[in-house]
Each structure stands twice: as structure tokens, then as C-alpha cells.
Image (tube, coloured by chain):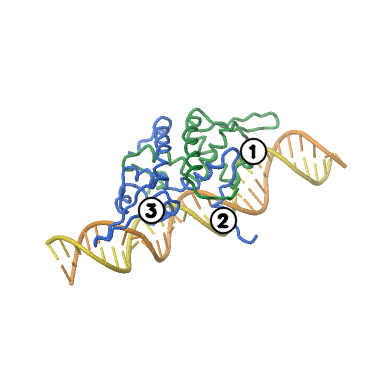
Chain colours: A blue, B green, C orange, D yellow
Amino acid sequence: MTTPPSQQAVEACVRGDVALSRAFAVLGKRWSGIVLGSLRAGPAGFRELSRSIVGVSDSVLSDRLSELAKEGLIARTVDPGPPVSVSYALTAAGTALMPALDQLSKWAEEHLPPDQSC
Amino acid sequence: MTTPPSQQAVEACVRGDVALSRAFAVLGKRWSGIVLGSLRAGPAGFRELSRSIVGVSDSVLSDRLSELAKEGLIARTVDPGPPVSVSYALTAAGTALMPALDQLSKWAEEHLPPDQSC
DNA sequence: ACTGCTACTTTGATTTTCCTAGTGGATAGG
DNA sequence: CCTATCCACTAGGAAAATCAAAGTAGCAGT
């Protein structure tokens, strides 16, 4: 094989639902969905996100942010104040995902485990 | 350490949306969403799932199936024919997730990358 | 000068996910 | 009977993702 497509990326054609696979190629990564959800409340800086999303490490947050930006779901804006400040915000595509996230969230409340970590 | 809570499981309290974190504690794992989506078409056996979900390995499929069963999203039914046949189906909680999956799928079609793996 | 802030990147360990191969039972063909 | 194939998994070990902690670099306050 000339160029092994990296089985990670190939989520591929599932019976009945190709689009869903593509959705999960993005949302199936560990923190992506939660990052997007956090951004729903409005734009935020790196440190702010890192603090509000409790269990994530800086390195992974950084990765996710880059990926989501590359996918066009969030936008990275730099304001060189001088006190350089970076802010991340949802793009149109990112915002379009919010209804689905709402539904997910509603489902979790109704059908998910009796869990008391918070 | 007596019982390390396994940082994986602790997705924790995010600003504005705890429920979403719980949803992604399930759906954020690599194949969970797609497995559930495949089951939407109706009950299926292990081999059938393994074939229809293209990139997944038996061992991971087995893991996901067990996890989803433990979470109560799918049910495992064994029919000892003699030709023992196992079938997995969505439970009520699992079925309740379908609308959200539909929305996700619709979103992916409209807003996701120009991708031509299929 | 020194401490603290934001925004990341680097390092090396830990965990998860992956691929390959194998088990045991059953049905099918020769 | 013997081999061959299918089903439903499990086992082993390697590869990738994630983790926590520390480091880099610019700027602000004391």
C-alpha cells in the first residue's frame, strides 16, 4: 500500500449513515464536544477555557482548539493589545451545532446514569 | 492510592453545562456514537455490526458493546438456538438518543468538510 | 528585579485504542 | 470422520491519544 490512510481518519461508510460518521470524526475526540459547548456561552480565551473545562490538560486543549479551528467550527482571533489577548469563538458552522448539543444535553439529563460527581 | 478515580471518567463540571459532559462521557469514546447509529436500523448481531461499521476492530467493538450495555443504552439478548445467536438492540434510553443523532447527522451534512472517502 | 498573568509548547509517563491471531461451538461439504 | 467456514468473542502486544507538570516568552504591577 502506497499511503496507508491512517485508520484513525477513515471512520468510513456505515450502514445507513455516512454523515453521522463524519460528525463523530469531529465530536468523537475526547474533548471536542465539551469545548464547543463551553464556547456557546460566548467567546473565551485559552486560560478561561482551561479553567472552566475541568479535566482537560493544556496540551490537549491546545490540540482540540487547533483542530476545531481547522475544521472551521471555531475562530481564533488575536488582539495585540499590547497585552496580547487571544479569543476563541464559534463560527456559523459551530453555532449550527448548538441545537444538536442542546438535544444531547437534554437527553443526558433524562436518560443518563445517577451520577453525583458534581 | 486506594481507588484512583481514573481521570478518564471524571469529565466534570463545565461552565454552563454539566449534562453535556455526561453525554460526552458516553458519546465521546471513539465508536460509541456510530455503534448506536448502526443499531438504529434494528437489532443486529456482533458479526453484522463488525461488518457494517467499517473501521472498528473486534476487540473495541466488544468493549463498546459492553459499555453501552452497562450504561443501559443497548440490550444484549442471547438465543441459544442451539446455533447460539446474540443480538444487540437499543433500549428506551438508547432510542431516546436517536433524534439527537439525527440532528447531528443533518448538521454534518450541511456543515462538515469536503470529504470524499466514500 | 521579582512575582504573576496569558498563551502556548515540550517532555515523559499513563491510558486507550488498535491490529493480529486464536478459542470453542455449530453447521456444511466430501 | 475430516476439513472448512461462520459466529461471538478474548488475548497479546504495539501504536496512538491523553495526562500532569514544567518551560518559554511577552507584558504589568510593586
Q: Is residue B36 left or right of residue A96?
A: right
| Callout 3 crowding tier (Cα within 10 Å): few <14, some 14–19, many ≥20 | some
What x and y, as percent, mark residue A37? 37, 43
Which residue is pictured at 36% across the width and 48% down the height? A55
Does the residue at mark 1 contact the one at mark 2 (Cβ under 8 Å)?
no
Nearer to us in this view, D20 or C8 = C8
Image-based side of A29 in relation to B56, left or right: left
* Label 1: which secondary element: helix
Q: Nearer the viewer, mark 1 or mark 2?
A: 2
Name the quadrant containing residue B46: top right
Q: Residue shown at 56%/33% (left/top)?
A: B40
Structural distance between the alpha carbons of marks 2 and 3? 23 Å
Vertical placement of C14 versus B75: above or below? below
Mark 2 burial class by Cα count in 10 Å: few <14, some 14-19, many 20+: few
Quarter location, residue B11: top left
Q: Chain of mark 2?
A: A
The CA distance from mark 3 to mark 1 is 36 Å
In the shown orientation, is residue C5 left or right of residue A15?
A: left
In this orientation, does residue A107 appear?
yes
Give, as a three-letter code, the residue at label 2: Ser
Respond whether the residues carrying marks 2 and 3 are from the same subunit: yes
Residue located beneath label 1 in the image: B48
Rendering coords of residue B117 (x, y %): 59, 50
Give residue A61's mark.
3
Q: Which residue is mark 2?
A: A6
Task: Give the quadrant of residue A18.
Answer: top right
Q: Residues within 10 Å of mark 1 (few under 14, many from 20)?
A: few
- Amino acid beneath label 3: Leu
Label 3 in the same subunit as label 1: no
